[in-house]
């Protein structure tokens, strides 16, 4: 029991804190031996680009997305804009058709985002393509900031930054989501400096068109599989924090939980299809980062959280005292705070003290349900989007 307990504590700490600290130390050491290359402002590298948005029943927001897209700072003669839809039952398609600058690729049958993107990629003739979600707004220079990274021939994709817009009075899950993405952004920065971002977020990322391969139709996390597919070809995924997509938090606790469960199910599906990345001899540049940042978060850490609590209880029942009792009190206090944060979240009340433990436990419970859906193959790749808060503040 003691071995299980201490191993579990170590692995949880490593997955969420230790990897980041070790990564930072490795980067600091690396800077003494490898000179950081500056990519410049991008003004001298303005290639032709296709900007692609997959949308489904986005009538409430699509006009704002289009206005934002048309205002992007990039030469019009070098920018092709494609919106791809399937199965939308609202006014999304009619709104898109009212803008002649945009090419609409629509099919009436609902097959999901993955199939829509695969279909749209056959119409891409430019050397680079930028993917963006329909419910996000981008900064004005986003395309310039993304494209300048492609001057490096070994860069196969570029991940943008995801920002969650959280109002002062946001609900607990909104604040938690925002804080989580701030930490993820820091890890992305360090991952990219060492070698490569560990999976681009679908809200905003760019790829070399020639490296894109059709993703299987049943893929849940298409952005994850696309970016790691590029890694497997020997290219890195760069990070552009100055190119960002902004979106509001999930509209409710239920919507956020549903999204987390889907991501977890997709994570297990992706890991089952990327088993060769575990071979450090075949992928020496990426295996450590991939296992530490992704695999452990979806497998080891959630399991070890449960093992740490159960083994701690059994040790104390068997007479273990001192430090074991202190750890048990700390764990019970932490989960008590998480439960209190959950009760407040259900009432729409934000607590800065409680949303950290709440959101942490919230994410890990979603992993367990996501794993169950993966085993039962109950998570469809055809996704009805989660509701998002329409305004902030």
Image (cartoon, grey):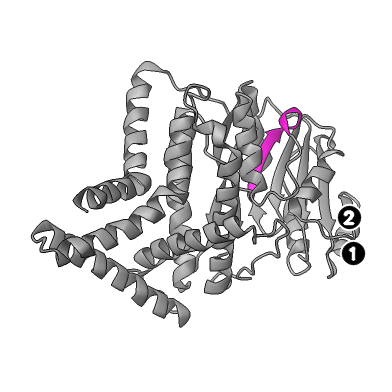
Tell which residue pokes out farthest to the left in this image: 322
Q: Please identify, in this view, whether the residue under mark 1 or under mark 2 is nearer the observer.
A: 2
What residue lies at 68% left-to-right and 39% top-to-bottom?
Answer: 143
Q: Position of residue 19 (x, y in %)?
A: 36, 40
Query: 187 or 65: which is nearer to us?
Result: 187
Identified at 81% across, 40% down, the residue is 121
Label 1, residues with CA under 10 Å away: few <14, some 14-19, many ≥20: few
Give the magenta range: 203-212
Location of residue 188 in the rendering, given as x and y in whole percent from the top left corner: 48, 40
* 13 is higher (above) or lower (below) than 48: below
- Locate residue 362, reporting x and y percent: 44, 65
Q: Is residue 206 magenta?
A: yes
Comparing 294 with 216, the one in front is 216
- In the image, taking residue 154 as reference, residue 2 lies left or right, namely left
Q: Mark 1 or mark 2: which comes first in sequence?
A: 1
**Mark seen at residue 185:** none
Q: Is residue 321 magenta?
A: no
- Is residue 41 visible in this depiction of the protein? no
Q: Are marks 1 and 2 in contact (CB under 8 Å)?
A: no
Instruction: Tell me the element at label 1.
Output: helix
Decide if residue 205 is on the left or right side of residue 59.
left
Residue at 71% of width from left, 65% of height from top? 384
Q: Residue 131: x percent and y percent?
A: 71, 45
Q: Which mark is residue 106?
A: 2
Q: Residues within 10 Å of mark 2 (few under 14, many from 20)?
A: some
Instruction: Name the quarter where the N terminus is drawn.
Output: bottom left
Q: Residue furthest front?
A: 318
In the picture of the structure, the residue carrying the numbered disc 1 is 94
Most foreground residue, 361 or 99? 361
């Amino acid at each position: 029991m003691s071995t299980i307990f201490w191993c579990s504590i170590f692995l949880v700490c490593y997955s969420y804190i230790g990897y980041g600290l070790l990564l930072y130390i490795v980067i600091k050491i690396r800077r003494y031996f490898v000179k950081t290359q500056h990519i410049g402002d991008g003004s001298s590298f303005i290639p032709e680009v296709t900007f692609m948005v997959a949308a489904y029943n986005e009538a409430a927001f699509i006009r704002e997305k289009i206005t934002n897209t048309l205002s992007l700072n990039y030469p019009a003669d070098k920018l092709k804009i494609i919106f791809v839809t399937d199965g939308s039952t609202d006014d999304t398609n009619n709104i898109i058709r009212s803008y002649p600058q945009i090419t609409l690729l629509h099919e009436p049958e609902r097959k999901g985002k993955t199939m829509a993107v695969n279909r749209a990629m056959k119409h891409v003739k430019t050397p680079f393509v930028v993917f963006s979600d329909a419910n996000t707004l981008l900064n004005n220079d986003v395309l310039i900031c993304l494209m300048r990274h492609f001057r490096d021939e070994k860069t196969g994709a570029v991940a943008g930054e995801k920002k969650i817009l959280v109002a002062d009075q946001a609900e607990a899950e909104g604040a938690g989501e925002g804080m989580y993405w701030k930490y993820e952004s820091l890890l992305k920065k360090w991952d990219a400096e060492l070698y490569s971002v560990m999976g681009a977020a679908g809200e905003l990322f760019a790829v070399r068109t020639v490296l894109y391969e059709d993703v299987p139709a049943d893929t849940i996390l298409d952005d994850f599989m696309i970016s790691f597919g590029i890694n497997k070809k020997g290219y890195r995924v760069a990070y552009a924090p100055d190119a960002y997509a902004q979106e509001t938090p999930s509209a409710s606790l239920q919507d956020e939980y549903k999204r987390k469960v889907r991501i977890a199910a997709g994570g297990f599906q992706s890991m089952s299809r990327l088993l060769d990345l575990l071979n450090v001899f075949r992928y020496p540049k990426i295996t450590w980062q991939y296992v530490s940042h992704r695999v452990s978060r979806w497998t080891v850490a959630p399991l070890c959280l449960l093992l740490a609590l159960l083994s701690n209880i059994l040790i104390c029942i068997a007479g273990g005292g001192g430090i074991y009792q202190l750890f048990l009190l700390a764990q019970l206090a932490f989960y008590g705070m998480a439960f209190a944060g959950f009760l407040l979240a259900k009432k729409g009340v934000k607590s800065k003290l409680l949303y950290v433990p709440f959101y942490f436990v919230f994410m890990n419970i979603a992993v367990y349900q996501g794993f169950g859906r993966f085993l039962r193959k109950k998570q469809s790749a055809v996704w009805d989007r989660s509701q998002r808060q329409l305004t902030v503040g």
